[in-house]
Image: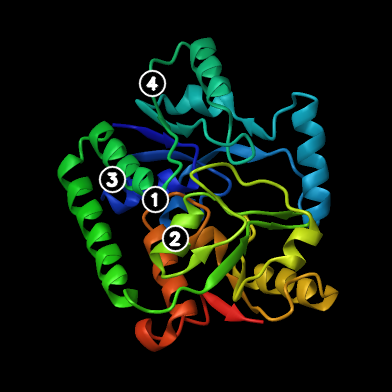
Amino acid sequence: MRVVSLLPSATEIVFALGRGDQLVGVTFECDYPAAAGDCRVVSTSALQPGLTPREIDEVVTSRMAAGEDLYHLDAGAFSQLQPDIVLTQDLCAVCAVDVTRVEDALDHLGCGASVVTLDPSTLDAVLDSITEVGDALGAAREAAHLVGTLRDRLARLHLGVEGAPTPSVLLLEWTDPPFSAGHWVPDLISAGGGEPVLSDPGGKSHRLSWQAVSAAQVDVVIVAPCGYHLDAAVQLATELVATSRLPGDASVWAVDADSYFVRPGPRLVDGAELVGQILHPELCAPPDPLRARRI
């Protein structure tokens, strides 16, 4: 079986199920595990490198308003790879190639690949999507074992923070302009023993005003910008603290968003555990400084 993944999270799932040897094509963002780098890149970004968050937002807003794609799909690569299965999404036009573009390309090339569309909007749905990928790849047993292990970890986390105070948490998925936490991210905060504020559980992330951000009555601010790992998130969080736009009494943390918060794959459970470590270090042990850092 030959598999192409158009999502970093789907790539992680394929490897977690022990089917990495079946993966022949990935996106330019598929950086985990390292073995994904051996696959051919079939999807690249239309965004120029080195843009600031504000510049990225402006380009994305402009291109979407004009009906222009944010990703380039290499149709020639599809023709050469001849995949049996293509893993994609229809959840967020900013996150990956639009599923209709994928289907159009396959039709144009006469490729009969099955398209598996993953659209989880909650943490439970993310775990269900692992089962869906497992079914598609003939790895149902492996998927059941993986999902069971992840649910066991979430259950242990729940027991670990049960009865503890519930700090209020504002998580920013983007910093300029500020965006709220959406989809499964509020579930991670709740699982880690916190109360998500200015969030939309199961819904889309949305723009916030700086007035709403600075006026929020929260104990903790977590800066988790989509598309950024820890070092870049630390820089952005440090800049926010310097502007005095965040709630004055809140502790501020930066996290490795791409690894543990914004990609709907198995490592979201690591993200939930990381929230527990940030909010309840006396119960869950302090967070790994390679994953989260207090500003």
Residue of label 2: 188
- Between the residue at mark 2 and the residue at mark 3, the CA separation in whole angstroms equals 27 Å
111 and 193: which is toward the camera: 193
Q: Is residue 142 visible?
A: yes
Q: Which mark is residue 113?
A: 4
Q: Which mark is residue 19?
A: 3
- Mark 1 to mark 2 CA distance (whole Å): 7 Å
Identify the mark nearer the N-term, 3 or 4: 3
Residue type at tag 3: Arg
Callouts 1 and 2 close, C-beta under 8 Å: yes
CB atoms of marks 2 and 3 within 8 Å: no
**Residue 163's mark?**
none
The residue indicated by pointer 1 is: 123
Give percent across and percent down for residue 286: 44, 85
Residue type of the residue flagged with mark 4: Ala
Amino acid residing under circle 1: Leu
Picture layout, residue 103 above or below residue 22: above
